[in-house]
Amino acid sequence: MNWDRAILTDSGGFQVFSLGDLRTITEEGVEFKSHLDGSRHFLSPEKVMEIENALGADIIMAFDECVEYPAEYEYTKQSMERTTRWALRCKEAHKNTEKQALFGIVQGGMYKDLRQKSAEDLIALDLPGYAVGGLSVGEPKELMCDVLEFTTKLLPKDKPRYLMGVGTPDYLIEAAIRGIDMCDCVLPTRIARNGTAMTSHGKVVVRNATYEKDFSPLDPECDCYTCKNYTRAYIRHLVKAQEILAVRLLSIHNLRFLTKLMERVRIEIENDNLLNFKNEFYKKYGYTKE
């Protein structure tokens, strides 16, 4: 990859969740059909560890099951317990413990007692870090924040805490407020493919006609390569012409926007000013009315 910084690989649990009727989950693992050619594949915790060990990422995730929202209590309980058993199997199968940190994934849906049981059982495995999975899967924001706050407090303060699948600016700030150290999401590149940029004053759908003769940068407050060298009008032209450069330029910008946001979040944490910053950011970005 020629990337000299930290690399994290997921286990495929969420991807299995997204396959819906194309997969079958058993205690042994997951059998699924490719959505591309219909070919059958099988993943077990041991197979996942074999793959992640071979990839050599710095942080690797245990195989888990992510349940949909809403989900019945009994199924969520069975799924959470299976995820814990799979985490133990992953730990036993992990062959490169000195160089690769295996994180467990706390599941349990929106049920706090299941979240607590999941966290307690995973902490007993004494893993290098812990993730919160199964959130931002369609539940209301207020519920997500409530379950996240409850769950994060259960996790060790001296180990990394990682919220999976969250990437909107508001959710990143909310996660930081609740003690989360790491987040990930495909959002910045996904919306780039749709011609959308995140800016200091909210989203800009640059493919829209209103930007046809707009020769300003995507975001005047941004220091990324895209904003220094290209205008909204030109990027819109690339989008309309279906040039791959449009996706790359928008991806560069969106990724820089989020990394710059988190740089600011770290500063505000050090200054004990994160809640005030949240309110200011929400107003500027358009999440709340002035």
Image (tube, rainbow, N blue to C red):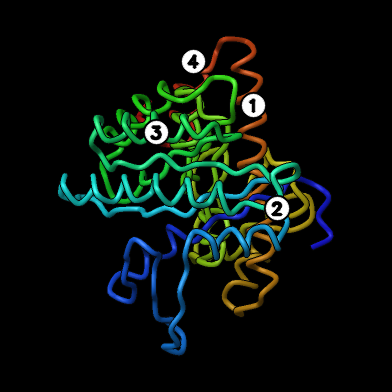
Amino acid under label 4?
Asn
The residue depicted at 45 percent of the width and 23 percent of the height is 178
User: Which of 229/257 is in front?
Assistant: 257
- Give percent across and percent down for residue 164: 48, 45
Identify the residue under disc 3: 121
> CA separation, marks 3 and 2?
25 Å
User: Around disc 1, counting alpha carbons within 10 Å, would you say few (fewer than 14), some (14 to 19), or many (20 or more)?
Assistant: some
Q: Is residue 211 left or right of residue 42?
A: right
> CA separation, marks 1 and 3?
35 Å
Identify the residue under disc 2: 57
Decide which of tag 1 and tag 3 comes sooner along the chain: 3
Please tell me whether mark 3 or mark 2 is closer to you in this view.
3
- In this rendering, the answer to whether 246 lies above or below 174 is below
Please tell me whether mark 1 or mark 2 is closer to you in this view.
2
> CA separation, marks 1 and 2?
27 Å
Q: Residue furthest front?
A: 92
Rendered image quadrant of residue 235: bottom right
